[in-house]
Amino acid sequence: MKKLTELYSGKAKSVYATDDADRVIMEFRDDTSAFDGLKIVQLARKGKVNNKFNAFIMEKLSAAGVPTHFERLLSDNEVLVKKLQMIPVECVVRNIAAGSLCKRLGISEGQELNPPTLEFFLKNDALHDPMINEYHIRSFGWASDAEVAIMKDLTFRANNVLKTLFANAGILLVDYKLEFGRFNGTIILGDEFSPDGCRLWDATTRKKLDKDRFRQDLGDVIEGYEEVARRLGVEL
């Protein structure tokens, strides 16, 4: 697979065209950002850890019947994925109250949510990813009702798989975001699943093992990511 021109460069990943029109190479960089890019640093090993972590999760989801864009790892920092037409909507699942949910609703961090909640956000850094609902998605043509139904179904199916996976490793899957895209007319999971896009707490101590360590200046950011990876059995 030949790596060609750069198609996109985000806050922590770059995407490159290949000689296959239906496949792209996604490169995980060591860049780490928060607060819509206002805080950016480079953390050694981050690209490698997130790439291997993401591949592990995508393979678990695919095995459980959740279709993903993942094809195969190419190197420590690169992965081959299907080229999707991305839907500009983030699906955020919350199993435990944390982050913006607590600020918006005035509830205490750590409250278990039963059933888990699903919220939609417009993927737009300039607008700080505003919260939206299914009417917005329909009115602005970001996705059809049928596509939204599929996204919701796949999101909750993924949640059932991932909650169990992390629980078996002594970790609480607090919340996370998923993004979807179209591939040959089918909705499948895209982007990534790594500690950059979810909250993960030790089930006993509630120690934070995700990007909140970076946001809140707790230190040992990548060490936290690596601890989660080791517990799950990810080969780094």
Image: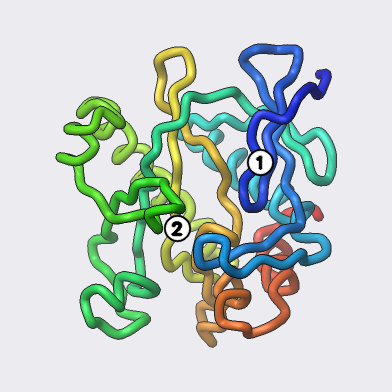
Q: Which residue is mark 2?
A: 176
Name the residue nearer the viewer: 104 or 173.
Answer: 104
Residue pictured at 68% horizontal, 25% vertical: 24
**Spot occupied by residue 205 in the image (x, y as percentages of width and height):** 54, 87
Of circles 1 and 2, which is in front?
A: 1
Q: Secondary structure at mark 1?
A: strand
- Numbered label attached to residue 198: none
Cα separation between marks 1 and 2: 22 Å
Please state which amino acid type lies under the numbered disc 2: Tyr
Answer with the quarter of the image where residue 222 lies. bottom right
Categorize mark 2 by other alpha carbons within 10 Å: few (<14), some (14-19), many (20+): many
178 with respect to 105 (left or right)? right
231 with respect to 102 (left or right)? right
Q: Which residue is mark 1?
A: 9
The quadrant of the image that shows the C terminus is bottom right
Residue pictured at 54% horizontal, 62% vertical: 166
Number of numbered callouts drawn: 2
**Spot occupied by residue 64 in the image (x, y as percentages of width and height):** 49, 37
Categorize mark 1 by other alpha carbons within 10 Å: few (<14), some (14-19), many (20+): few
The quadrant of the image that shows the N terminus is top right
Is residue 14 placed above or below 172 in the rendered structure? Answer: above
Name the residue nearer the viewer: 49 or 60.
Answer: 49
Is residue 194 placed above or below 90 in the rendered structure? Answer: below
Please state which amino acid type lies under the numbered disc 1: Ser
**Spot occupied by residue 122 in the image (x, y as percentages of width and height):** 34, 47
Is residue 236 placed above or below 139 in the rendered structure? Answer: below
Q: Secondary structure at mark 2?
A: strand
Is residue 224 placed above or below 130 in the rendered structure? Answer: below
Residue pictured at 58% horizontal, 23% vertical: 83
Answer with the quarter of the image where residue 147 lies. top left
